[in-house]
Image: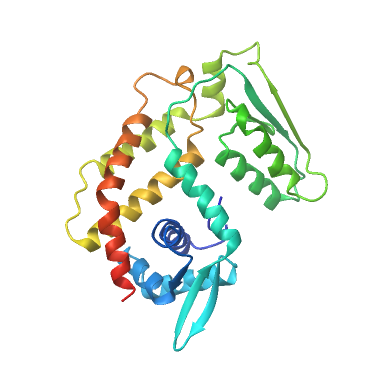
Amino acid sequence: MVDPPRGSTPGLRKTRTLLLTVLGEAVLPSSSWVWQGTLVDSLVTLGSSVAAARQAVGRAVADDWLVSERVGRRSQLRIADSTVERLQLARQRTMDFGNSRDWDGQWLFVALSVPEESRALRHHFRTELAWLGFGSLGNGLWVSPHTENEESALRLFQSVEGPNGAYVFTGARPVTHSPRELAAAAWDLDELRDRYEAFLERFEPLNPRSSREVFAAWVELLTSWRHFPLFDPELPDSLLPRDWPRYRARQLFREQFEAWTDGALDYFRSLES
């Protein structure tokens, strides 16, 4: 997963989040190269100031997301190979997210013990575990109904040199709780429902007219939807309350994405001229 680092100001984090969407959805599908001015102009279209847009692009170069090359008096940017791979994975997860899944009743558990002084490592593990669909039961115990993510969890902990205090195992549900009770303990389903309802309220009535408005709406739609895998573990239907709003939200996302993509990409290409 690619995400703006902690420590950035809220305004810069928002601009960098939008930049990731533009790179992954407007640039990468057709090329890994883009003019620096095009990226800055696109971020300004999305509501960032010129200064904030330039700072976000500059930080992306400094953080090795992008590689800069002078072409005459202009700067051309290439998405770094490592960033390409992560953006492609994030894009695939975003587009596949929200489909109904079958479940065999098995759980995947992670017991995690990271020293207090290793806060950055603990934050890294927590963020990546959430991205993989795990929920926290507290005291370093994480759970997921997606046992197919076992290898991904193992790779996460194996990617860190030295001992990391992580144990990964599978099993049936604990005998003290029903599957729904376990899900309700590991994830805040009320908050998640509110997020989906807010998404529906925002994008159902949205009807952009101009090409600029279409581009802005398209990027906002993608950015909003791209965050749901961080909050929603895609629990099986049997673990969810009735009338769960994720399916309505996914249908709306697909409809608006298909309706706006061509116009949004045409607008982005117009910035290159």
Q: Residue furthest top?
A: 175
- Image position of 109 (left or right of 210): right
Q: Residue at x 28, y 70 (%)?
A: 270
Q: Residue furthest bottom?
A: 72
Q: Position of residue 158 (x, y in %)?
A: 75, 44
Residue 6: % across, % down: 57, 57
Q: Quadrant of residue 267?
A: bottom left
Position in image of residue 237 (x %, y %) = 44, 20
Up the image or down, 146 lies above or below 6; here it is: above
Residue at image location 78% in from the left, 43% down from the top: 164
How many numbered marks appear? 0
The extreme left residue here reads 209
For the point 45% across and 37% down, the residue is 97
Q: Please, is residue 211 above or below residue 38 in the view?
A: above
The image quarter in which residue 211 lies: bottom left
Q: Nearer the viewer, residue 175 or 105?
A: 105
Quarter of the C terminus within the rendering = bottom left
Looking at the image, is 144 positioned above or below residue 90? Answer: above
Question: Can residue 66 be seen from the camera position used here?
Answer: yes
Identify the residue at horizontal 45%, vertical 64% (top origin): 31
Q: Relative to 80, is 195 on the left or the right?
A: left
Camera-side residue of 232 and 104: 104
Residue 241 point in image, percent of width and height: 41, 20
Which quarter of the figure has residue 37? bottom left
In the depicted structure, whether residue 88 falls above or below residue 41:
above
